[in-house]
Amino acid sequence: MMADLTAAPLTTADIHAQYGEMTRRKRLYGGILLVLFVALMAAGFRTADGRNAGSFRDGITHVFDYPAEVLAEAGEKLTELPGHLVTFFPALIETLNIAAASTLVGLVFGTLLSLLSTRGMAAWPRLIPLFRRIMDISRAIPEIVIALVLIFLLGGGPVPAMIAIAIHTAGALGKLFSEVNENASLKPVEGLESVGSSWGQRMWLGVIPQVGPNYVSYALLRFEINIRASAILGFVGAGGIGYELKNAMSWGQGRYDEAAAIFLLLFVTITVVDQISSALRDRLIHGAKA
């Protein structure tokens, strides 16, 4: 159907009026969404506060009581702090091992899932929706839920934690990697295909060199997240420094100095890893742009 060439051209006033209408409509939709969000937050807060053992208003006034008790006891036993740091350092190494192993496994499977779910790169194009749903399910289920199921099946220890975090990491990284793949050029893939290369060779030689820096950057960021996740999973019996922190906190007064030492180890470790990974990510990104 041909365009109507007899229609009068739009004037500046018409364009200005249309733009103003679009702006007002956008503001209206934004205001409606904001009102719905505030209403849902208020309703959720009232429901949670009603089901709580104590009132939020009463509890908020005591929010700093526990940190004050921990710091007070740690200050009284300051001379024992170096010994506690040495005692809990192996548990910290175990937590780092869980995070590193789960990140590596998640990186491998996330890469595979992302390539299999990207149009123009997938080995089986008809199965792209299946691989995308696998990634959705993997990152939709919290690590702690997966860990609880695995602990029931395998028993407590670092292995269930590693598997749980790796499953979630594969789904999260797979989603990020697939978005990176969308911006990759398919010309090298087509060239390799024309000379009879296999799917693995096309991906390894035609795609990975383009997206590799972004993959590593996202993996380093995920490693930081997995350190925190592995520490949290220790509270459900998955080992590592989180398990030691749970014991120290559950014991109560008399072992608050140990809890303070564990908090200090975690804080220093996460800060150092964050600084190192940020520097590496910046170098990778700048190198990719160069």
Image (spheres, helix red, strand yellow):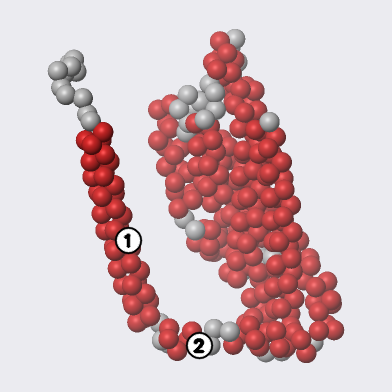
Quadrant (top left/top right/bottom left/bottom right) for the C terminus: top right
Is residue 7 or residue 72 the one in the foreground?
7
| Picture quarter with the N terminus | top left
Q: Is residue 9 visible?
A: yes
Relative to residue 72, is residue 216 depicted above or below?
Answer: above
Q: Mark 2: which amino acid?
A: Thr
Looking at the image, which is closer to me, 92 or 177? Answer: 177
Residue 280: quadrant of the picture: top right
- x 54%, y 83%: residue: 63
Mark 2, Cα crowd under 10 Å, few <14 / some 14-19 / many 20+, is: few
According to the image, label 1 marks what residue? Answer: 34
Q: Could you tell me how far apart the alpha carbons at marks 2 and 1 are, in whole angstroms?
A: 29 Å
Name the side, left or right, on which 109 lies relative to 276: left
Q: Residue at x 47, y 24 (%)?
A: 120
Q: In the rendered view, tell whether residue 86 sits above or below residue 76.
A: above
Q: Is residue 260 shown above or below 36? A: below
Q: Position of residue 250 (x, y in %)?
A: 62, 82
Q: Quadrant of residue 194?
A: top right
User: Who's the residue at 33% across and 67% down the image?
Assistant: 38
- Is the residue 137 above or below the residue 9 in the image? below
Q: Is residue 27 left or right of residue 135?
A: left
